[in-house]
Amino acid sequence: MRRLKKKLGLITAKMFDVPQDVALDLPRITVIGNNQLLIENHRGVIVFSEGLLKLRLAKGSMEIRGKQLVIRAIYSEEVYVDGQVSDIKYFD
Amino acid sequence: MQSQWLLALRGYATIELRGSGPEAIEALINAAVDRKMTIWDIRIKQRQVAELKIVIADFFRLKPLLKETGCRIRVKERHGLPFMMDRLGSRQLFVAGLICFVAGLYLLSAVIWQVKVEGNDKLTATEVLEAARAEGIRTMQWKFKLKETDELSRGLHSRLPGTSWVGVEVKGTQLIIKIVESKQPEQKELQSPRHLVATHNAVITQIFADKGKPMVKPNSVVRKGDVLISGVIGDEVHQQTVVANGKVKGLVWYTANVEVPLTQMHKVYTGETQRRDYLLIGGRALKLYGYRQQDFEREEIIEDRKTLHFRNYALPFGWLKERRMQVSEQEQALDQAAARSLGLERAKADLLMEAGAEARVVDQKILHEKTENGKVYMETLFEVEQYIMEEKAIVQQGE
């Protein structure tokens, strides 16, 4: 059932030319230089320290590495991160 | 993200979080976000110690979560209006001063500080102010004690005779009374009883008495000082003195001695001109154009002065344009007849100036004429019809 829904979403996204993050629950990541990040569609914080921020996603997780990471703001859907970002990794 | 202003208004705190387990802090953040709490500026200071900011309202909702996740908190800083108000509470004198200041300002602005009177001409300001005082308008009066302005203006209008409209306007702490005075007919000057007497020896041509008794008739001869219109009317028994008024015209003779030179000097422009421009600064003029010009021997100067104005004020700057025109004098020879008519014209003009309004020359006669030393001498007689009446007060004799 869930798989069917996902497939339907994919088909509609392709048909109506809608961005996939809207149709499917994919994260949208906006990076400004290497010091500002906006992650939309996250599902919560797994690990947070000065050098690492691990976020749960709808499917899998992602990892942000850097220095002096600060969560500038956090809401149920989006996270604003400041700091010197060096890596952004994605895990399925 | 919310604006700093809004956050300051709601009040927020910087708190320190200590987690008991390895992922306690993350769990707390997730739980807080799930409950839609406003938290921001989260930073990890060391292992299992974080610092974050939270709105006061959410701070109190945080407590049950702490137990769930096993975190402890410590408040480090407080910001915003609610804390400020809290702090103010302990400084009662300061708050009292603040309230007094605001109240004082309000009270002082609720008082009439100045009463102005505008538009009065015959009525004095003191009269108006006195009437206003009776209506309750005075300085240092509470505004809320005043009646409505239209009621005030009606009251003032009835108290002030000779006004056709009175307006009352409150402008801040100022009360302005505008007055339009009613126009009244001009009062006639008081005059004492008088005669009208002759100013010259003359033959009467017209007499028209407005008031008083005419004493002469047309074609009668009068001497200077004779009564023309008498201010005493009535017969011997019923007598009254009045202000005699009227118009009397008569023929008066003048002899005039006229001399006219046979050569006349005339000023003639030669056509040579020079232009000079000056910049005026204060009382000084700085010549800008027209250096190295030789002054004419005889000249006439036409000045065109322009001053800079700002609204109604004259500024100390201006521009002066000068036109200098060369003049030369020319002699013109006159023949006898021309000189004679010129002399007569001049004499007539002088005479009419002297004889007053509505005078006219009836006749003229040259009595004697001679030419000597390049001049024409004439003795002429003019007959002029003019007003000849003059006022003379009646002196009441004591009985």
Image (cartoon, rainbow, N blue to C red):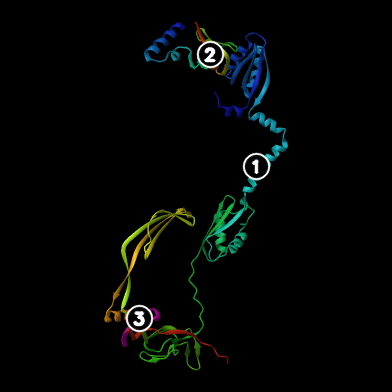
Please tell me in which quadrant of the rendered image residue A84 appears.
Answer: top right
Q: As displayed, is residue B226 above or below residue B3?
A: below
Name the residue type under label 2.
Answer: Val
Q: Is residue B172 left or right of residue B278?
A: right
Q: Same chain for the residues at labels 2 and 3, yes or no?
A: no
For the N terminus of chain B, the quadrant is top right
Is disc 2 surrounded by few (<14), some (14 to 19) or many (20+) residues within 10 Å? many
> Considering the image in quadrants, where does the C terminus of chain B appear?
bottom right
- Residue B369 magenta-highlighted: yes
Q: Is residue B45 above or below residue B93?
A: above
Residue under numbered circle 2: A85
Q: Nearer the viewer, residue B114 or B274?
A: B274
Q: Is residue B278 left or right of residue B136?
A: left
Q: Is residue A86 left or right of residue B362?
A: right
Residue hosting label 3: B347
Measured as percent of width and height from the top left, residue B276 is found at 39, 56
Same-chain status of marks 2 and 1: no
- Residue B68 can be seen, yes or no: yes
Q: Quadrant of residue A13?
A: top left
Q: Is residue B244 visible?
A: no
Residue most toward the bottom? B236
Residue identifier under label 1: B102
Question: Gap between marks 3 and 1, in whole Å?
Answer: 86 Å
Indicate the chain on which mark 2 is placed. Answer: A
Q: Magenta span covers which residues?
A: B347-371
Query: Residue B392: horizontal and vertical position, in percent?
Result: 48, 85
